[in-house]
Structure formats: structure tokens, C-alpha cells
Image (cartoon, helix red, strand yellow):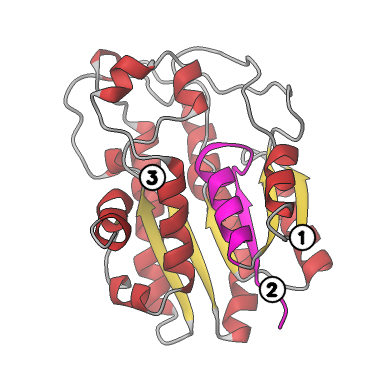
Amino acid sequence: MSRPVAFITGASRGIGACTAIELAKNGYNLVLTARTLKEGDKNEYGSWESNSTALPGSLESTAEAARKEGAEVLCVRSDILDIDSVLAAADQAIAHFGQVDLLFNNACYQGPGNMQRVLDVEIEQAQNIYMGNVLTPLALVKKLLPGMLARKSGAVINMVSGSAITDPPAPADEGGWGFVYPSSKAALIRMVPSLRVEHKDSGVRFFSVEPGFVLTEVMKANGLDDSIAARFKPTPPEAIAEIIHWLATSEAALEQHDRAVIFAPQLHKKLFTDQA
């Protein structure tokens, strides 16, 4: 039996990289996309101001770890602000593996505008955020979902954010969050209910996953240190990866299929911690 294929955006580090390794351990081949192909590559990711310091992690590093678990891996450098590059990666995935069984829209826009107040955000920044967080995931769904529907199996999982459904406790630069990033994730949340009603009983499952607070390399580079993070009890990215695999494969996950958003930390505690 051939191995299923997962297409993961933002797979160079964090949740994307951990999910790739988790899926490799469980029999998947992988198509990994991100901007950072090699260690040391520099990309813009500053949420408050410009920052392009090289971060740990790369597609090549993720692929090396996944191959050790038996996966065949295709790495394609792409940028979610460039839909053509992402769709080209999807074309390469189909040409190489023949199909994609799991689409994990994990990447999100990292750059100026994410954490600005309403009157401070530039329209161009807002356009970038919506391009990366809404339009590119939509383009990938339009590209890859028809094949899943034809095979009557597969999964589409979108990474969303609690900020999309929670009022900020303070202004963006005083411990809260801005408007544009949460609103983009709110738009992405609304995709899944539409897909469910449009493709009911299709054999394809659709989920939005809220990861809780996960301390990432990008957050650290943007000034969030371990002492601050400790107050929020961060969830390890490996735990989110286990939930992504469970949602994509478990028959029991279908009991969650009517939920607008899957709150990964709580579900992980129920499935893996409380049962230990």
C-alpha cells in the first residue's frame, strides 16, 4: 500500500516542522514548503518592525529528520505572499507523488502590520496579511481539494488563532493584539464550515485548529523571552503535531467534525495526557 502524502506550508520550523516529523513517523510522504530552504537563509518576519535575522530551522533540516523516519520528502521553496510560487509547489507535489491526501495550511504571514493598532497599520501591510493568511490557503484548497473529492478521501486542516475569536485585553502595543491579523484568521475560520456543508458525505474531513500559545522561534526573535512566555503555559509544538495527525487519520476525530474550531491544547490533554 502506498504511503499517503501531506502538503505542509510553513514547514521549516515550529508546528510545521514538528507536524512533518510526526506524519513521517506515521507513514506519510511529505511535500514541505516555506521561504527558508537552507539554514541561515534570511527572511522578513518582524511583527512590530522589520526584522530579517536568520532563524534556526529550514526545509532541509525538517526533511532530513523526516527521512530518518522513512518518509520520501519533496522540499519546495515558496512564499505565501506569492500565490504563483505556492501553486507551483502544489503542481510539483502532484507531478512527483501523483496526489495529495492531507493539506495542512500552517504558514501565516510574518511581517510588519501584524501587531499594529488600527490607525497605524498600512493598507499594503493589511493586503499582505490577507494574501498570506486567507487568499493563499484558499488557492491551495481550490488546487488540491478536487483530487481528494475525486478519491473520496483526504483532509484539509487550517491553522487559525484564538485572537480571531477573543477580544484583545489591551491595545496592540500594550499586551493585546491588532485588528488585521485576527480578522484574517477569522476569515480563515469561516472557510471550514462552508467546505463542510458544500462537501457533506464526501469522505474528506475539514478542520480549523487553534494551537493555543506556542513559543516559536519567530516569537523569540520578536522579543518574547522565556520569562514572559512562562506566564502563558506554552504548548509544545510536538503536541499540536500529534493533534494534526489524529484529526487527519482517526475515525474518532469525525466526532469533532461539527466543531467550528478545534482547541488543540485541550484536546491533546484529553486524548494523550489524561489517558497516560
Asked if 54 appears above or below 251 in the picture, the reply is above
The quadrant holding residue 185 is: top left
Q: Nearer the viewer, residue 149 or 247?
A: 247
**Number of the front mark, 3 or 2:** 2
Asked if 44 appears above or below 247 in the picture, the reply is above
- Residue 128's tag is none
The residue located at (77%, 60%) in the rendering is 72
Secondary structure at badge 3 equals: helix
Q: Position of residue 125 (x, y in %)?
A: 50, 26
Residue matched to label 3: 185
The quadrant holding residue 237 is: top left
- Residue 72's tag is 1
The quadrant holding residue 255 is: bottom left
- Residue 3's tag is 2
Q: Earlier in the sequence, mark 1 or mark 2?
A: 2
Q: Earlier in the sequence, mark 3 or mark 2?
A: 2
State the CA–CA distance, disc 1 to disc 2: 9 Å
Residue type at the position of mark 1: Glu
Is 65 covered by the magenta stretch? no
Residue type at the position of mark 3: Lys
